[in-house]
Each structure stands twice: as C-alpha cells, then as structure tokens.
Image: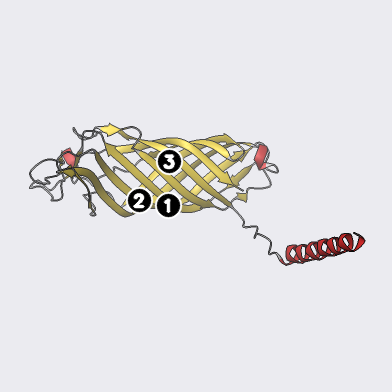
Amino acid sequence: MFRKISASFALLLIAFSLFAQEKKQRVKRPDLPGSFIIEFGFNRAQGSTPANFDQGFWGSRTLNLYYQYPVRLWNSKFSYRPGIGLSFERYKLANNYTLNKQVSGDGTFHLIPASSPELNMPNADKSMLIMNYLDIMPAEVRFDTKPDDLSRSIHVTAGVRLGWLFDTHTKVNYSINGQDITSKDSQQHGLSSLRYGFYGKVGIGSFGLFTYYNATPVFQENKGPDRTRMSTLTIGISLSGF
C-alpha cells in the first residue's frame, strides 16, 4: 500500500513539474495599443430616394470592423482617436426590384423587377444591393468621464469618416422549375466611389450606441435611378475591446 501511495505521489509531482514548466514557457498575449471596434446597425435611405427603392428593414444592415489608436489630449478627459477599417453595407429591396445590368439610354441605371425580360429572374425571393468600403476616421474626438478607467467610463464621441468603395454588386435569389439560383452582378452601377459622413456615439465601457450620416449621395450625379440624390443613415450598437 505504501509503495502504491509513494508511486502515485511521485507521478503527481512529475505532472505538476511538467505543468509548471509549460506555464513558464507559455508566450504571453501581446498587449496591442489601441482599440478594436465592432459595429452593427440598420440602414435607411434618406432624401431623394428612387420610386421603386422599397427598402426592407432587417435585410438593410451594416457591419463595421475598425481599429483605432487613442491619443490623450493635454492630459484631459478628451482624446483624439484616428482609425481605419472596413464597412460592409447591405440594402434589401423588399419588392424584388434590382439595378439593371446595362446603363439606359439616358445614362442612368434603372431599378427594374428581377422578373423583367431584361433580367429573366422569375420567382425572386431576395434582392440585395451590397457595398463594401475601406474607411478611415481622420478626425474623431471622444470625451470620457473616467479616462483612467475606461471599462466604467461614460463616453461621448463625434467624428468624420471617409470611405472608398472597393467592392459592390447586386444579388438576387430566384428559382426556375424548383431550382434555387443566386445571381450576382459585380459592377459599380453608377455608385459613388468615395464618400464622407459624420457620426456620433454615446455609451458606457465597451458598449455604445452610434449613428452615421452619409453626406455623399450614394449614386454619382445623374447616374442613379431617377437621377437620385439619395443619402443614407445608419443607427446601431458598438462594441470595443481595449
């Protein structure tokens, strides 16, 4: 019995020693400066919208992934926070209209039914306009009530965002003879390549609410359906990791 207890104790010591060595050798997670931001929001068209831009709520959404580097201003409760990241925007057309693949005779892209002879996509059940941007935030200022304890700080933020449209396409799901088909048309469709807008946030700790107004028309002048001057507004939640 004593031998069994001694052997078990020896094995326990060896296991503990190996665990301790592994713990010492374990590389520490790097402490990266700055903050990673995830934002999720819903988009709404603003201003002069085209006649058939019948927007669905749940499908019209934005996902933003940003990195920001905070710089405290004059040892105060204010900080300057430049950043960069990606914005993935979706607009669902509830009436299953979509942008035509060809520019019309008047130089604009028309919104037409997916089932029209030009497109021949019958029984459509989803139509999306997708725009993906590379964004920079050159001028964001944030106020924190507790700058030395951000996890408990109430914060208010205002800033300017600039974006470059690096990818865009329409997407339509339809069916023929019971077969489900997805059609994507990857072209610019007269959309503006560059945008700028203004945003604000309010929150506590890592959680916040944000709103973003895109001051640039979504379509280039005299290129969009009905020569629209449509802009957009996004409202959602923001999560950050310090």
In this rendered view, identify the residue nearer to me: 23 or 92: 23
> Dot 3 lies on which element?
strand
> Dot 1 lies on which element?
strand
Residue that label 2 marks = 132
Q: Residue at x 47, y 49 (%)?
A: 65
- The kind of residue tagged 1 is Leu
Specify the quadrant of the image occupied by residue 48. top left
Mark 1 or mark 2: name the one nearer the start of the chain.
1
Q: Which mark is residue 209?
A: none
Query: What is the count of numbered marks?
Result: 3
One can see residue 65 in this view = yes
Question: Between marks 1 and 2, how big is the CA–CA gap?
Answer: 7 Å
In this rendered view, identify the residue nearer to me: 3 or 13: 3
Residue that label 3 marks = 198
- The kind of residue tagged 2 is Asn
Query: Which of the two marks, 1 or 3, is nearer to us in this view?
Result: 1
Question: Between marks 1 and 3, how big is the CA–CA gap?
Answer: 16 Å
Q: Position of residue 124 (x, y in %)?
A: 19, 39
- The kind of residue tagged 3 is Phe
Q: Residue at x 12, y 48 (%)?
A: 107
Residue that label 1 marks = 86
